[in-house]
Image (cartoon, helix red, strand yellow):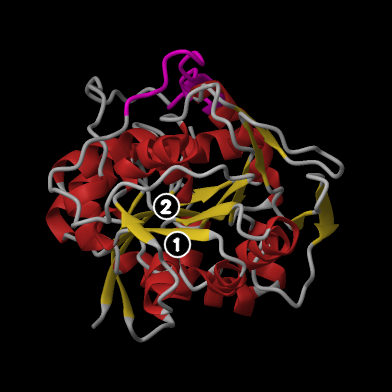
Amino acid sequence: MVVKVLVVDDSGFFRRRVSEILSADTSIQVVGTATNGKEAIDQALALKPDVITMDYEMPMMDGITAVRHIMQRCPTPVLMFSSLTHEGARVTLDALDAGAVDFLPKNFEDISRNPDKVRQLLCEKVHSISRSNRRVSAYSAPAPAPVAAPSPAPAPAPSSSFSPAPVRSAPAPAPTRSAPASASSPAPKRKAYKLVAIGTSTGGPVALQRVLTQLPANFPAPIVLIQHMPAAFTKAFAERLDKLCNISVKEAEDGDILRPGLALLAPGGKQMMIDGRGAVKILPGDERLNYKPCVDITFGSAAKSYGDKVLAVVLTGMGADGREGARLLKQGGSAIWAQDEASCVIYGMPMAIVKADLADAVYGLDDIGRHLVEACL
């Protein structure tokens, strides 16, 4: 089946280049382009694309506002383009909160120097998120905030459009779904876990936010988070989670010590391992590995260090990262949970766990935080 794509960007060069890259794939058809968020909404309604690629900073209406409207009026998987800066990371996280499925760095140098790599990555992303369309439509689109009618004035700079995160004592409410989650496993039994390890990829930033904001400040187990994300993004993501959650969240550094009520996020571009003393080791990203950070590596080190005292959770994401690490954890007697298909943006990583018969429980996204509290407190 051909994937129909709408390309949105105020740069004529970038619109043409993205359109050329996508059109070179015979299973992708660029059905239209737009130069601002207002045009993007109109084109999305008229053309009904399978995927929309979206820039952030545009005249008339910025990309985040456009995503909110699209998710309300014609939910469609959106792939955001983002700058590799701290502010770009914050804006991208806002876009994911608004309903975008995934993102790619907007790097003109890479397009010039590594066109084949860019082509492969972009086409793979478009194909993968196109398959999330039904779930985005039915489950994942957050309710949009009221937005005034667009004016011809230029959009504000990214820094002015970033909404301050709620205070720690008042986590942001989780978006509601218009359809019920699939049947899930019974509530877990309580156990003295020494570590909770959570791995995720596409759809993970929003999923982690919805899980972690349900945990109390006195959550008794240390937590490690492995999210597939570029190096420039993980610090901003950890800061965002820390503001939203009652527990503390920080980007992991070499030598950090695990402690209750603290979640350590693996830094992008590197690998995170845990030793038997509860210390974190941060290692350079191995070019032979597809994922940096890699869920398998962190899960595997936890299996070696903590035996049967780990509760591992695999959330939404493409591929099968986490399956082999979960296998090691399972062999040691630890517990493995998987997110259910209905609440996933991409049912890849959790599906790999379920198909390998490694899941002790399968839960909907909005139940996982509550069950973590039941299992550990």
Residue 208 x %, y %: 47, 42
* Cα gap from disc 1 to disc 2, whole angstroms: 6 Å
- The answer to whether residue 137 is left or right of residue 91 is left
Residue 131 x %, y %: 29, 69
**Disc with the residue nearer the chain's start (1 vs 2):** 2
* Residue bearing the label numbered 1: 317
Q: Is residue 91 visible?
A: yes
Q: Is residue 212 magenta?
A: no
Q: Quadrant of residue 105?
A: bottom right
Tell me the SS state at disc 1.
loop
Residue depicted at x 22% and y 33%: 143
Residue depicted at x 56% and y 73%: 327
Residue 20 x %, y %: 45, 73
- The answer to whether residue 115 is left or right of residue 77 is right
* Residue bearing the label numbered 2: 203
Residue with the most extreme right position: 255
Contact between marks 1 and 2 (CB within 8 A): the answer is yes
Identity of the amino acid at label 1? Gly
Q: Quadrant of residue 288?
A: bottom right
Check the image and report above or below for 344 versus 117. above
Tell me the SS state at disc 2.
loop
Q: Say which of 131 and 8 sits in front.
A: 131
Q: Is residue 158 magenta?
A: yes
Figure disc tally: 2
Identity of the amino acid at label 2? Gly
Check the image and report above or below for 18 versus 21. above
Q: Residues in magenta?
A: 155-173
Q: Say which of 24 and 193 sits in front.
A: 193
- The answer to whether residue 154 is left or right of residue 178 is right
Q: Is residue 44 visible?
A: no
Give the class, few, some or many, for how many residues have Cα within 10 Å of label 2's Cα (few <14, many ≥20). Answer: many
Quarter of the N terminus within the rendering: bottom left
